[in-house]
Image (cartoon, rainbow, N blue to C red):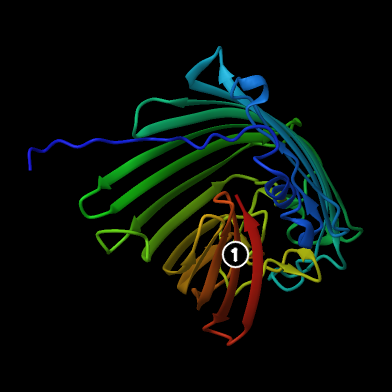
Amino acid sequence: QDEKFDVVFRSAQRNGWGNDKKEILFSLLRGAPYQTVNPEYFNIKGRAVNFVSMLRWDAQKRRVLASLSGPLRRSPQWRYRISLEARKENWDIRRTFSGNTPPLGDIRMEKAEARAEVESTVNGRLAWTTGVRLSHRKFQNQTLSQSSAASFFMDGFSLVCQAQADYKLLRLPERRLTADSMTLGQLGRMLNRTSPLFSLAEESLETRWLPLSRGDDYETTSRIQLGKALGKVPFDELFALGAERDSNLWLRAHIGTRDGKKGNAPLGTEYFLSNLELDKRIYGNGFLKLKAGPFFDTGRIAEPTSNFGSKVWLWDAGVQSKVGVFGSVTVLLSYGVDLRSGRIAFYTTVTR
């Protein structure tokens, strides 16, 4: 009545490996079904310094990642992040390659990368990140030099500078509606005498709406993403539309791997992707939260030389469930149908 109210805020800060043995084990082994472990240690010595890592021993896509982040000069407004990563992957692109002379057999890619970033929170709406990454890649396949896509498979070092801005575009608490945008730009080149510059740009807009005045029994999420690359982009920098644990461009009835090998999802240098999902809260307590509902995805991806790309619009629909555990880990299960081909896809993953 008098337009006054009290707010009590209790922050749940992550410390060390976790709060108890069950949470520690679940967090560490959440990727075990996918031959992955995730050692993570937060708030080292009470200084808001975090160590995050992952080790994946899948024979088709090995990966090691280690990242250290913390406040810059003890300022909460500024944070640094230093990351090291190594990959050894087998790719099979015979189903997604549409050029004249496809590579025969698998493509072995070995890549090592070092990255340094600085993040700044300007205010309650705007945050930006800038950084640089140095990579070395090597491709192995005896027929690559004869392929019409040989220019994508460039060995050697590359240097990429990038900048990202995250903006809270809309906040309507009385209608429980939010909208967040992200803009990412990258400029790089292969470090040899003949390679020109290449660039990548991406934009995304995500809206969330809780239609009821209280609780989260229903939630609608809409996400639009688009991107474009210019210049001679290395193969591993191409965009891929499909369900794959190393990607966030999900078409949930298009699985990004086949027999464990990447390359099954449409690849390209420019894309548009739209995801719409409705979640209904089914069960929840202090330990477990279960949501389920339908989703609808559509997108298209292209590439100027016509060696890659989807050629047509892709349409996927299905249902998914989200199981939240310990309030920090979510198990996602999706069942999707490719509305063009009728192909069915079931996929699972675990996220923070």
From the image, tell me which residue sits under label 1.
Answer: 332
Between 297 and 107, the one lying in front of the other is 297
**Left-right relation of 280 to 145:** left
Name the residue rendered at 54%, 64% in the picture.
301
| Residue in front for this viewpoint, 190 or 294 | 294
Give the class, few, some or many, for how many residues have Cα within 10 Å of label 1's Cα (few <14, many ≥20). some
Name the one closer to the observer, 302 or 81.
81
Q: Is residue 22 above or below residue 85?
A: below
Q: How many marks?
A: 1
Helix, strand or loop at mark 1: strand
Quadrant of the image occupied by residue 351: bottom right
> Could you tell me residue 119's position as x and y percent?
51, 27
Location of residue 38 (image quadrant): top right
Q: Quadrant of the N terminus?
A: top left
Q: Amino acid at mark 1?
A: Leu
Between residues 14 and 176, which one lies in front from this camera angle? Answer: 14
